[in-house]
Image (cartoon, rainbow, N blue to C red):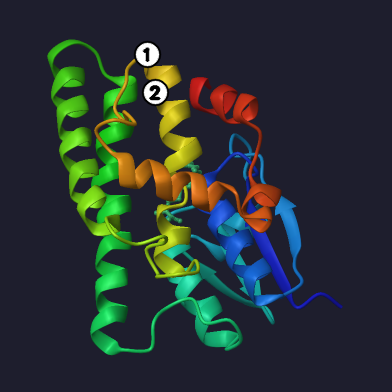
């Protein structure tokens, strides 16, 4: 019997993170595709607070919130560690993961869907936030070092997600000449077969964002 289930939606890059982590750990799982316009009773039962995907179910116990799930996976399956061992490095990786979700996701999504002055401001603030991430990745192949880790998975929505946000929002925020190191990281990250394997198609995310 499968001990691990993921309640997700294939067009959600928050959910892709979870698949990347499980595959890196070599953990088998069952993927339950949620219709976000008609959520299953199980999803509502296992994530009653936020009612969002992803939710991980392990031996009948639920974990919600993708960054929390990544940490859970790292603690439950010790092989191929995702977080560094050093406490300060661990805290720093968590800090930047939260920065990505709280700041970069929020600003770029706002830029995508807003208009006029609000849009212009959100575009500017997205670029400022990306410049901060650019500094973080400068001089490194991956955020975690030579190989990918927790922070790479957390920032992993950027290559495909930002380009879709740019298309749907009819704007440009992630210019290659302004963010050369982040672009290089994006290329290195997207070249990893396991990363590619879990990603939805660009067309389906575009449709998802338009919806
Ligand atoms: N902070 C959450 C965000 C998850 C999230 O926003 N999930 C979206 C799909 S991308 C969702 O379930 N949306 C359904 C809804 O808001 O009703 C996480 O990291 O897990």
Label 2 neighbour load within 10 Å: few <14, some 14-19, many 20+: many
Q: Residue at x 50, y 44 (%)?
A: 187
User: Residue 17's x, y, as percent?
Assistant: 54, 57
Check residue 166 in the rendering and tell me which mark sits there, or answer none. Answer: 2
Q: Secondary structure at mark 2?
A: helix
State whether residue 161 is above or below residue 21.
above
Quarter of the view holding residue 140: bottom left
Q: Residue at x 26, y 78 (%)?
A: 91
Decide if residue 32 is on the left or right side of residue 98.
right
Decide if residue 151 is on the left or right side of residue 11.
left
Residue most extreme to the right: 1
Q: Residue at x 18, y 49 (%)?
A: 132
Disc 2, disc 1: CB below 8 Å? yes
Q: Nearer the viewer, residue 34 or 170?
A: 170
Q: Which residue is mark 1?
A: 170
Q: Secondary structure at mark 1?
A: loop
User: Residue 176's x, y, as percent?
Assistant: 34, 31
Check residue 181 in the rendering and tell me which mark sits there, or answer none. Answer: none
**Quadrant position of the N terminus in the picture:** bottom right
User: Residue 44's x, y, as percent?
Assistant: 57, 55
């Amino acid at each position: 019997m499968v001990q691990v289930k993921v309640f997700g939606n294939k067009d959600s890059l928050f959910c892709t993170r979870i698949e990347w982590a499980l595959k890196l750990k070599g953990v088998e799982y069952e993927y339950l595709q949620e219709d976000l316009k008609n959520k299953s009773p199980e999803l509502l039962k296992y994530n009653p607070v936020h009612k969002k995907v992803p939710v991980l179910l392990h031996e009948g116990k639920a974990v919600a919130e993708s960054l929390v799930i990544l940490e859970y996976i790292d603690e439950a399956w010790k092989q191929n560690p995702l977080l560094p061992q050093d406490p300060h490095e661990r805290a720093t990786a968590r800090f930047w993961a939260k920065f990505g979700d709280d700041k970069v996701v929020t600003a770029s999504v706002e830029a995508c869907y807003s208009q006029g002055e609000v849009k212009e401001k959100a575009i500017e603030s997205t670029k400022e936030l990306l410049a901060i991430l650019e500094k973080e990745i400068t001089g490194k192949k991956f955020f975690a070092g030579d190989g990918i880790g927790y922070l790479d998975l957390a920032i992993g929505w950027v290559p495909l997600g930002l380009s879709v946000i740019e298309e749907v929002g009819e704007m440009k925020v992630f210019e290659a000449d302004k963010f050369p190191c982040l672009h290089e990281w994006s290329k290195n990250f997207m070249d990893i077969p396991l990363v590619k394997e879990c990603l939805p198609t660009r067309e389906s995310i575009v449709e998802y964002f338009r919806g």
